Image (cartoon, grey):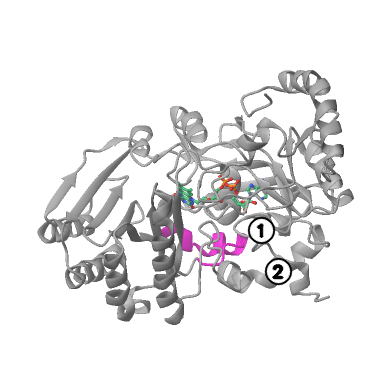
């Protein structure tokens, strides 16, 4: 089976072995009047799958088991040339397109119902070009990147989940435990190769505006990014982590802790990351630091130690080991997780927090989390160089719910939406594109804010016919209505 672990030779061999079965499948498809042939080879660059192929099921699935979309065709591409062929195929067959790298989109925007999915899972390598630059395939996982870089004392500021791919992460921004020190993932992006919706293979060396657009505004909008180059940083030697827990808290107590956390997290040094979490019963405060604690950090620790029922103080660990504590689940799970707004400070949400916490308490299993941004992310030069629109926000919040029993889905989804409505009514509009929600309206504004006009001009230049048209993708029709 031509799955991600195969090399080019094995891939081509698979295609020829498949020939006989393919013919039989095509006959069957024609008999059933199925519009698209089942597996069509072309030069070893791309192989097309429809639902009659066993591989279709594997390739269709993403990390979120809640999402169940069925594309007409999945084009498993081996190269930029393969992607260009797949785009021509989509045009010929009047199929809308989306692109999938690591399949971690929380709302399945990389798996287009009824369209064609460009599957880039074979483009998953990482290699050093020189001591401080790496070339990466979009489907390369964060785990693979960290495991390649850290033994050499290098680091790329990414997210925490091991199986998230660099493609989707970077194109939407990419924040993580060390972003306040090193910037967003997209801030390290130097060069991109893309096959545009117009069908051309382009490189950002000849268009700096496209590079700007890919740094925060590039998920499934202009084309399929097939190669990325990043500058890498000297890795921090160690990371220390702290956890402060309060069990059986009331809404009032959770609100008091949350308010204190906003006050003290705002002044933490850039070497620290912190998060506030409330699951309806327990509050958690996470803190990490890649340097020695200064007076501000010590005060943060002392304050929450006094306010907590359980404290866990980690020792400073080698960065490669410390990051593993946040790797999370590698295999697909059933969940809902979405951006709950980015804000500058607590005053923006203070008046609604008791209502939000009461709703969280009402539905055990729903989690509200706020993470620190700020620090280097707010650097003016980085802001100018990228289309990530929310650098003025110091905090990024998210709602989460995880379940296995399908009967729980409705309860979680309904109450999730009720909480989102409270934030929307309060006027919270900035949302993180990498934590999308299918319920969000006017996503151009929510995700891209002040940068929307520049991004739409790039859309018009590279995908004038709106071939890339998953839900929430930019549309040229927005600027040039039919
Ligand atoms: C468990 C989990 C943990 C996470 N942790 C973090 C975190 O710590 N920090 C953070 O910032 N984010 C985090 N995320 C969000 C993550 O950044 C996004 O889900 C990201 O878009 C996933 O990228 P992907 O390539 O794996 O997903 P995909 O589903 O393949 O793609 C996601 C989106 O990007 C588009 N896209 C993907 N590849 C390309 C490409 N090559 N060219 C053009 N468009 C493309 C897709 O069309 C889709 O819209 C997490 C997500 C999960 C599920």
Residue 240, picture quadrant: top left
Marks 1 and 2, the one that precedes in the sequence: 1
Q: Quote the CA–CA distance across marks 1 and 2.
A: 10 Å
Residue 397, picture quadrant: bottom left
Which secondary structure lies at badge 2? Answer: helix
| Residue 394 in view here | no
Query: Which residue is labeled 2 in the image?
Result: 454
| Residue 111 in view here | yes
For residue 46, side relative to residue 65 (left or right): right
The outermost residue toward the front is 31
The one nearer the camera, 372 or 59, is 59
Q: Which residues are magenta?
A: 374-390
> Residue drawn 77% across and 68% down?
476
> Residue drawn 30% across and 48% down?
289
The one nearer the camera, 311 or 316, is 311
Q: Magenta stretch containing residue 163, yes or no? A: no
Contact, mark 1 vs mark 2 (Cβ under 8 Å): yes
Q: Where does the image place residue 478, in percent across and percent down from the top left?
A: 74, 73
The vertical placement of 149 against 369, above or below, is: above
Q: Magenta stretch containing residue 378, yes or no? A: yes
Mark 1, Cα crowd under 10 Å, few <14 / some 14-19 / many 20+, is: many
Q: What label does residue 212 carry, if any? A: 1
Q: Where does the image place residue 206, in percent across and percent down from the top left?
A: 79, 51
Q: Where does the image place residue 340, in percent across and percent down from the top left?
A: 43, 66
For residue 140, side relative to residue 210 (left or right): left
């Amino acid at each position: 089976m031509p799955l991600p672990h195969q090399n080019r030779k094995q891939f081509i061999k698979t295609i020829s072995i498949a020939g006989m079965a393919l013919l039989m499948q095509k006959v069957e498809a024609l008999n059933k009047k199925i519009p698209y042939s089942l597996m069509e080879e072309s030069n070893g660059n791309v192989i097309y799958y429809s639902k009659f192929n066993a591989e279709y099921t594997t390739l269709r699935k993403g990390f979120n088991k809640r999402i169940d979309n069925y594309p007409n065709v999945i084009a498993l591409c081996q190269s930029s040339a393969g992607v260009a062929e797949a785009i021509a195929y989509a045009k010929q067959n009047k199929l809308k397109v989306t692109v999938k790298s690591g399949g971690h989109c929380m709302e399945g925007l990389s798996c287009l119902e009824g369209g064609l999915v460009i599957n880039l899972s074979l483009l998953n390598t990482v290699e050093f070009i020189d001591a401080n630059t790496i070339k990466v395939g979009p489907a390369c996982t964060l785990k693979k990147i960290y495991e390649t870089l850290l033994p050499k004392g290098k680091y790329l500021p990414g997210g925490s989940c091991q199986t998230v791919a660099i493609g989707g992460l970077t194109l939407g921004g990419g924040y993580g435990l060390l972003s306040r020190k090193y910037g967003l993932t997209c801030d390290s992006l130097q060069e991109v190769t893309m096959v545009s919706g117009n069908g051309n293979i382009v490189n950002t060396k000849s268009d700096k505006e496209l590079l700007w657009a890919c740094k925060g505004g590039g998920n499934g909008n202009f084309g399929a990014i097939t190669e990325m180059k990043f500058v890498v940083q000297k890795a921090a030697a160690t990371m220390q982590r702290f956890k402060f827990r309060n069990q059986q808290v009331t809404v009032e107590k959770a609100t008091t802790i949350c308010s204190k956390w906003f006050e003290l997290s705002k002044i933490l040094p850039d070497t620290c990351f912190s998060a506030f979490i409330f699951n309806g019963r327990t509050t958690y405060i996470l803190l990490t630091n890649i340097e020695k604690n200064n007076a501000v950090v010590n005060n943060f620790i002392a304050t929450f130690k006094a306010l907590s029922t359980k404290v866990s103080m980690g020792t400073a660990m080698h960065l490669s080991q410390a990051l593993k504590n946040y790797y999370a689940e590698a295999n697909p799970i059933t969940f809902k997780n979405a951006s709950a707004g980015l804000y500058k400070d607590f005053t923006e949400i203070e008046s609604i927090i008791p209502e939000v916490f009461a709703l969280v308490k009402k539905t055990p299993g729903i989690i509200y989390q706020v993470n620190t941004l700020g620090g280097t992310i707010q650097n003016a030069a980085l802001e100018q160089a990228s289309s990530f629109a929310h650098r003025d926000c110091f905090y990024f919040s998210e709602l989460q719910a995880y379940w296995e029993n399908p009967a729980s889905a409705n309860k979680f989804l309904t109450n999730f939406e009720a909480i989102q409505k409270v934030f929307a009514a309060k006027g919270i509009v900035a949302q993180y594109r990498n934590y999308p929600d299918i319920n969000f309206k006017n996503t151009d504004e929510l995700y891209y804010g002040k940068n929307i006009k520049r991004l739409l001009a790039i859309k018009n230049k590279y995908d004038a016919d709106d071939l890339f048209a998953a839900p929430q993708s930019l549309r040229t029709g927005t600027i040039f209505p039919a």
